[in-house]
Image (cartoon, grey):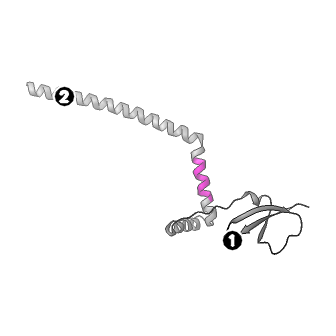
Amino acid sequence: MSPFWVQINSTHFGVIGQYPIWGYYPFYLKAIIMTEDQSAVVTLKVRVTPEFREKIVSTAKTNNRSMNQEIVARLEDSFKESDDPKTFESLAKIVKETTEETTRLHKELVKIIEQQKIEIENLKKG
C-alpha cells in the first residue's frame, strides 16, 4: 500500500508539515491528501495592487488560463529568455555591431568637422 501525503495546516502558521500516512487518518485534522507528485508544488503568497491583479485577470482571460497558470507561464518565460545562451550570444553580437557602427560614424563625423574647419580657414583667408 502506497502512503498518502497529508499536509497539516494551521490558520496562524500556514503549512506545519507534510507527513506520509498509510491508511486511515483522524477526521479532525485539517489536512489535504495529496500524491507525492503534488507535494513537489509549493504555494507562494504574493502581494499586488488591485490594479495589477486586474491586469493579471484580464490577461489570463485573454489567454484562456487561470490566474495561477498565467502567472506561472509568465515567470517561466522570463527565466527561459534570460538563461538561453543564444540570447546572450545574439545580444553580444548586436552590441559588437553597434559599437563598430558608432566608431565608424564617429570617424566620419571627425572628418566632416576637419573639412569644415579647413573651409572656414580658407574663407577667412580669401
The x, y position of residue 17, in whole percent, is: 76, 62
Q: Quadrant of residue 101?
A: top left
| Quadrant into which the N terminus falls | bottom right
Amino acid found under the numbered disc labelled 1: Thr
Which residues make up the magenta segment? 72-81
Q: Secondary structure at mark 1?
A: loop
Residue identified by numbered label 2: 117
The x, y position of residue 99, in whole percent, is: 41, 34
Q: Residues within 10 Å of mark 2 (few under 14, many from 20)?
A: few
Q: Mark 2 or mark 1, which has the lower sequence index?
A: 1
For the point 50% across and 40% down, the residue is 91
Q: Secondary structure at mark 2?
A: helix
Amino acid found under the numbered disc labelled 2: Lys
Residue identified by numbered label 1: 11
Could you tell me if residue 90 is visible in this image? yes
Q: Residue 113: within the magenta?
A: no
| In this rendering, position of residue 11 left or right of residue 47 | right
Which of 111/56 is in front? 56
From this view, report whether residue 48 is shown above or below residue 78.
Answer: below
* Residue contact between numbered discs 2 and 1, judged by CB atoms under 8 Å: no
For the point 60% across and 55% down, the residue is 75
| In this rendering, position of residue 98 left or right of residue 19 | left
Q: Residue 80: within the magenta?
A: yes
The x, y position of residue 37, in whole percent, is: 78, 58
From this view, report whether residue 87 is shown above or below residue 67.
Answer: above
